[in-house]
Image: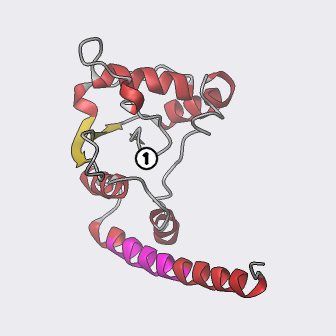
Amino acid sequence: MITLDYAAFGWGSVLEHMLVNPLEETLEAGLSRELLEELGVAIPISVEDHVDSCYAPSSSPSSSSCLITNFYVKKMEEEQIREIERVAASTATDHGLEVLGMVRVPIYTTKGLASYLSHSFISNARAQLVDSLLRFNLVGPKELHKALTYSLKIHTQTAEDLQAALTLTETKWKPL
């Protein structure tokens, strides 16, 4: 199974710079087009692949723009995923510019998943991923809870490490 979230997991944003004109194409057609550009493989996306939408109002009071993120999940066989991985680097027009390939979420170990979940995610992408892992029974609730708890510990340790590094640079470097 491959999860497709064009905002968070390495896929180009379909709505970036208003690339989807609802009078000309559907969100699914726009996402299919983006996947072709970024992966070099035509992957048909349908309304049935849509999982969630989320409204995100502008954080700036002076801006009237808003963002609606749409989350899609495409079920694929292992061989299809391997073919995409093989083709992407050599044929995708945007490979190396917008994306560097697919990312497989390491769901096979609690620590691997915890490490992955401790990374920074854009917008609500982490919540979308967690929801999909549960929704499609890829990870059990108890294992996911364990991974998220461990992820929080990793994140806390990372914050402490970054603070120590920042302190070190402040003591070693004195502005003139």
Q: What secondary structure do most residues of the magenta stretch adopt?
A: helix
Residue 137 x, y percent position in the rendering: 29, 54
- The answer to which of 173 and 101 lies nearer the viewer is 173
Is residue 67 visible in the rendered image? The answer is no
Who's the residue at 34% across and 19% down the image?
29
Colouring scheme applied when the structure was drawn? secondary structure
Quadrant where the C terminus lies? bottom right
Residue 44 belongs to the span the image colors magenta: no
* Highlighted magenta segment, given as a residue range: 145-157
The residue at the far front in this view is: 176
Report the side of 165 relative to 13 (left or right). Answer: right
Who's the residue at 43% across and 47% down the image?
8
Amino acid identity at mark 1: Ala
Who's the residue at 41% across and 53% down the image?
122
Residue 152 belongs to the span the image colors magenta: yes
For label 1, the residue is 8
Who's the residue at 24% across and 13% down the image?
23
Is residue 102 visible in the rendered image? The answer is yes
